[in-house]
Amino acid sequence: MRDLIDHLTSGRVCYLTSRGAMISGDSLELLAQLPADSVDLFVTSPPFPLLRQKAYGNEDQQRYVAWLTEFAKLAKDALKPTGSLVIDIGGAYQRGLPVRSLHQYRALLAFVDDVGYRLAEEFYWYNPSKLPSPIEWVNKRKIRAKDAVNTVWWLSKTDQPKANVGNVRVPYSESMKRLLADPARYYTPKDRPSEHSIGEAFGRDNGGALPSNLLSIPNSQSNDAYLRTCKALGLPGHPARFPLKLPSFFIEMCTEPGDLVVDFFGGSNTTGRAAENLDRRWLTFELDAAYAAQSAVRFMQGQDPERTLKAVEQMTKGETLAIDGPA
């Protein structure tokens, strides 16, 4: 891992863990320095092209696709033939109109048609806890429904990326649990009207059901450990975070322990935390040095607050912190 980190000369290492590193720097430069065929999985959520400028930086809708495609090109060069790029892109409205922007779909077409990715599968992240937005069209005029779904494109470098959905099974429904408890009572093997043959294996307990491509994951983290720690330390915390379960799902599905996971829009480093939890090596890139340093609190929870705050201040000024030993 140290040899790989040493390749990234244009960035600055903020902190190291036993499995990865947060690097502050320009992601375009850092992606260009990754060795070819070295990354098993990119998981990222870029700043969305919102109409209001955000503190964490977001691109204008007019140039968003061209801007994002530059990152996708460099990521493809660094991917292994069995590797994947998973990118979460939220929707937006056009300025002043109750009409949707097509940026996430234009980005997908550019990735496939211009860069050469394959679309392995489209996923949709449903956030049931998302607040009604945009206010003008939903709350005030009540002419549009709440926007609660993000598109998540699972893209691959070749036709056969590494994947095993058996690793991400979900809990059985109550009806399926009853069937498994007494298969003979609830189920008889037969052909369905659709001509699909449902055999006896249907009643076998596999430890959970196979997932669909609709991921229902609440993002109600207003008081999670990361934000509580930031608040206790007087730090603002990153304002745009996806839930830990989202990158965890794709890390478990598309990689194995020891594989390399990279997030090039790191933010509060949810991806790095997820990869660390799942015994994957990881690299996270973040342009904003303050956000990069503050993300270390994900790996320092439960430590002395004064010591943690001092460490964050030192990283912001350019020092490197080792957490739980060298990477």
Image: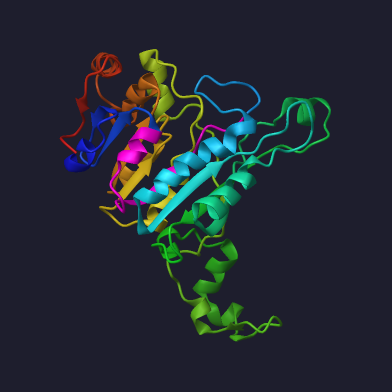
Please give the range of residues in magenta. Answer: 28-49
* Residue found 39% across the figure and 26% down from its top: 287
Which quarter of the rendering shows the N terminus? top left
Image position, residue 173 (x, y; %): 56, 61
Q: Nearer the viewer, residue 248 or 57?
A: 57
Image: 39 above or below 178: above
Residue 34 inside the magenta-drawn segment = yes
Query: Would you identify the image quadrant in which residue 150 lies?
Result: top right
Residue 11: percent from left, percent from top: 29, 28
Which residue occupies the extreme bottom position in the image? 190
Residue drawn at (17%, 42%) of the image: 3
Q: How many marks?
A: 0
Residue 2 visible in image: yes
On the image, the x and y values in percent for residue 307 come to 23, 16
Q: Is residue 37 left or right of residue 161?
A: left
Q: Is residue 141 above or below residue 326?
A: above
Q: Residue 195, how many percent across, how many down?
A: 66, 84
Q: Is residue 245 visible?
A: no
Magenta residue check for 27:
no
- Residue at the image point whose x is 59% and y is 21% from the top: 53
Quadrant including the C terminus: top left
Q: Is residue 45 left or right of residue 19?
A: right
Q: In the image shown, does 228 or 252 lie closer to the viewer?
A: 252
